[in-house]
Amino acid sequence: MKELVGRTGTLLLAGLVVGLMCSVALADQAAGNATPKLHKELVIKRGLSPDAAKCIECHSKKTPGIVESWKRGKMAHASVSCYDCHVVEKSSPMASQCSGIKGSNIYISPMVSSRTCSRCHPQEVEQFLKSGHAKLASYPVVEKKKTLNLIYHLEGAEFIGNSRSNSSNMASREAGCQMCHGGQVELGPDHKPIKNTWPGGIGTRYPDGSIGTCTVCHTRHQFSVEEARKPEACASCHLGPDHPDIEIYMESKHGQIFATQGETWEWDSAPDAWQPGDYTAPTCATCHMSGIGELTTTHNINERLKWDLVHPKSVIRSGERGNGEKGAKLMRKVCVNCHGQSQMQKEINTLDDAVALYNFYWDGAVKMKKELAAKGLLGKDPWSDGFQEIMYYLWHHAGRRARQGAAMNGPDYAHWHGFFQIFQMYKDLQQIYNYRMKYNKIEEPSTVMSTGPL
Amino acid sequence: MRILQNNGGAVLVACVIAFLVALVVAFFAAKKVQSTSTVEFCNSCHEMHPFYKTWAAGKHGTDAKGVIRARCVDCHLPHDSLGNYLKTKTMAGLHDIKAHWLGKKTDWLTLWKNRGPYVHAAYDSGCMECHKKLVAPGIPLKAYTAHKAFLVGQTKRTCLDCHHEVGHGDLVTEFREIAQKASRQ
């Protein structure tokens, strides 16, 4: 009897212990504390509506990088949250719902244009929209026939059978042109972007009619002013064989001092208060945008420019490209903060001379081209015609390098990559012109290779 | 002067009567201005129904809790001076009567396609009748930052340029639904 009780009792006791342990474990599970949380969950209440707080709480788990970046910036300090920038009306062409708000009255769009920013930054956006960074920037990707032909027919390989209905035909646009210039965002029936038209560069055109992506220079979600003031912000796009602006800058004295002393500079001063002293040499932003001396900050980068150094012939800016006469006066007001009159005047004179010299070459090339055209001696396909190809590189590559190198003191670009190449290209043009005029036919096959004189 | 000397009494009586008549007319006119400023009056024309409905459901309407109801005239007429208010009210009223009698139908969706539904609809002086202080205790920091440019006069934007849904919500969606219902019938 005792043995029976003893064994049963022990069994019962063991069972009881196991049962207790199980129930504790179950209770723990039910309480949700069974496994430790491997990620942070941010709970922020101050200054935010309950809906906005929910965005942050969910996204701190789903896209922690975004929230981490946001919380470092001034937006977070001002209680500007996801809701403020991403919520749109239900009737917006870009309206959609993430899983967190499905079924609610709230609609969002991941695409944020300058119009949204303009609600709190109206002046900046107003200035920006007048500049070459807005509609003019995306013009070649969206409207200009010549560049559209280049992007899809030529680069997209349609001319050798790669139809425009193939996704690969868009690769040059979506990886190249669109990422700097910005393109036209197209949406599908669910209001999500199609054809890889989003995201894009600075002049992106959005389906609601707005233009411009502010986050190109002060990247989301930190929106750092320091970032926008550093040359790296501009360097993403203003580089390369056809406008080596960052290269010219780094070659110049300003770039040299930035490279050696920039780490000690003060980058975070308030707008209009970032002045010489905070820095010992200017960056792109300093001269082209920031408040300095008696000038106030502007987001219109055309405002302080005199010359158009971009197009085939350089003229003093006018119309939608700015006001060159005014720009010349404004830029002097920038230089005068650090430079004496003699040095400043030398730089101004040098650029005027460089522009005049380049224009002289260009006029000559245009004259030759006209005469060839009159006699039907120009190839139908400009990209298979040595004369026209060289003429393109003359203005688009070497010509820009010469002008912009002269403007910002990059002697290597003004000379070796600029005028040194220009005069030789011009000689090539003369040779081809002479041959065609002499024999009254287009040379064949073309002796000029397509990898232009880079 | 001779008239007064001879008929002084009659002139006095005439003046008093004229004054009383003017008083009655003024009282009547003021009453009419009041009665044509009510929401019910504006809503008495069927064309106004979608606007009434969206207003009632919106931030300044009947369904909103804890806020002061804004009548149609509080926003859609200027409140910078009495003269301007009465003048605009008269012109707008005459226009609406004419449109109603002529049966003129407005294609709102097409009109709003490029302009947006909030262009020139309501007056800033209307908003500011109640929202006098944009910087005050209780108003969050980001509102202060956002209103800075407006208060300092550095922007030409109006209240509605940013706050375009406070009156009638998402009007474009509302009218799309109306158009859908109409096409189904």
Image (cartoon, coloured by chain):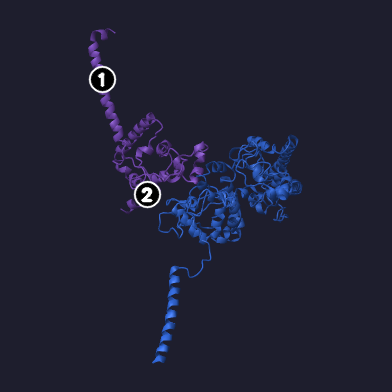
Chain colours: A blue, B purple
Position of the N terminus of chain A by quadrant: bottom left
Q: Is residue A248 visible?
A: no
Query: Can you give x and y, in whole percent of width and height, for residue A67 in the image?
Result: 54, 56
**Viewed as shown, does residue B98 lie left or right of A101?**
left
Query: Can you give x and y, in whole percent of width and height, for residue B5 in the image?
Result: 26, 7
The answer for how far apart the CA atoms under marks 2 and 1 are is: 52 Å
Mark 1 sits on what residue?
Answer: B18
Chain letter behind tag 2: B
Chain letter behind tag 1: B
Local SS, label 2: helix
Disc 2 residue crowd, few under 14, some 14–19, many 20+, Cα 10 Å:
some
Query: Can you give x and y, in whole percent of width and height, for residue A438 in the image?
Result: 75, 47
Mark 2 sits on what residue?
Answer: B174
Residue at x 32%, y 43% (from the top left corner): B47
Name which residue type carries label 1. Ala
Residue A438: mark:
none
Disc 1 residue crowd, few under 14, some 14–19, many 20+, Cα 10 Å:
few
Q: Is residue A23 visible?
A: yes
Same chain, labels 2 and 1: yes
Query: Toward the viewer: A366 or B179?
Result: B179
Label 2 vs label 1, nearer the camera: 1
Query: Can you give x and y, in whole percent of width and height, for residue A307 in the image?
Result: 66, 39
Residue at x 35%, y 37% (from the top left corner): B73
Name which residue type carries label 2. Glu
Q: Earlier in the sequence, mark 2 or mark 1?
A: 1
